[in-house]
Image (cartoon, rainbow, N blue to C red):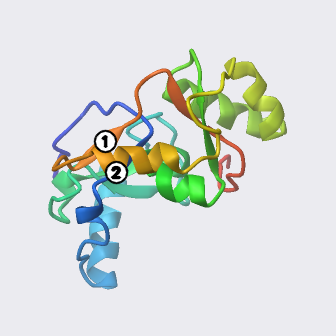
Amino acid sequence: MNKPIVTNFVLRPGVTNPSLWYPERPPKAQWDKIRKVVLERDNHTCISCGHRALKYMNVHHIEDSGENVPENLVTMCVACHAVLHIGRNLDLKVIEIWESPFSQVEIVQKTRTAVQQGLALADINKQFKLKKGPHAPDSLLYANELVHEIGQEPRAYLAEPLCAVFVNLNRWQIE
């Protein structure tokens, strides 16, 4: 049933090539049908972190320049989707960029679990052994440098050990 073109998805903080921003989307009614097919196919489960929720799940294009067909779309939780679009989410003050020995998926999973337990994001982030990267943690330079260096590639990612940590994300889908 309209399997996605990838089954393994590595989560890294990144940006989309500006030439691909604001692509044409089908009319809302058609998009809603496509979105429903993808969510049901993926059992409302994030391809990156494995979180399942019936509300607020996002649908992400595998190939940013690709078509709006189920084979080019995957289900992602809000947190993992925020990681893939760091420029927007740094600007919205949702994330910060730090060096960490933890993988990006571990950061998402451990943060969600701790939020479920009622811990504050500032306290949660202490467990990730964060070290300052080359820029201030909330600097848009992380995204801007990727955009500047992206060339013709559809996406660019920050190098490890740089990771996104959450400082102001409200939709943790903990129900």
Q: Which of marks 1 and 2 is in front?
A: 2
**The one of 125 and 9 positioned closer to us in this rendering:** 125
Instruction: Report the disc number at residue 156.
Output: 1
Q: Which amino acid does the dot numbered 1 rest on?
A: Ala
Label of residue 89 in the image: none
Query: Where residue 87 appears, x then y in whole percent?
Result: 48, 54
- Amino acid tagged 2: Val
Residue drawn at (55%, 46%), measured in percent from left and top? 79
Task: Tell me if I can see residue 38 in this picture.
Answer: yes
Q: Is residue 109 left or right of residue 143?
A: right
Compared to residue 170, the image places residue 100 above or below, namely above
Distance from the alpha carbon under mark 1 to that under mark 2:
7 Å
Residue nearest the observer in this picture, 17 or 73: 17
Please name the residue shown 66% across and 21% down the image: 131
Query: Crowding near pointer 1: few (<14 within 10 Å), some, many (20+)?
Result: many
9 and 137: which is toward the camera: 137
For the point 30% across and 74% down, the residue is 31
Residue for badge 2 = 147
- Give the structural element (helix, strand or loop) at label 2: helix
Q: Is mark 1 on a helix, strand or loop?
A: strand
| Quarter of the image where one finds residue 26 | bottom left
Is 164 on the left-hand or right-hand side of 127?
Answer: left
Mark 1 vs 2: CB contact within 8 A: yes
Q: Determine whether 25 is above or below 117 in the image.
A: below
Q: Position of residue 18 (x, y in %)?
A: 30, 61
**Residue 47 % position (x, y):** 37, 39
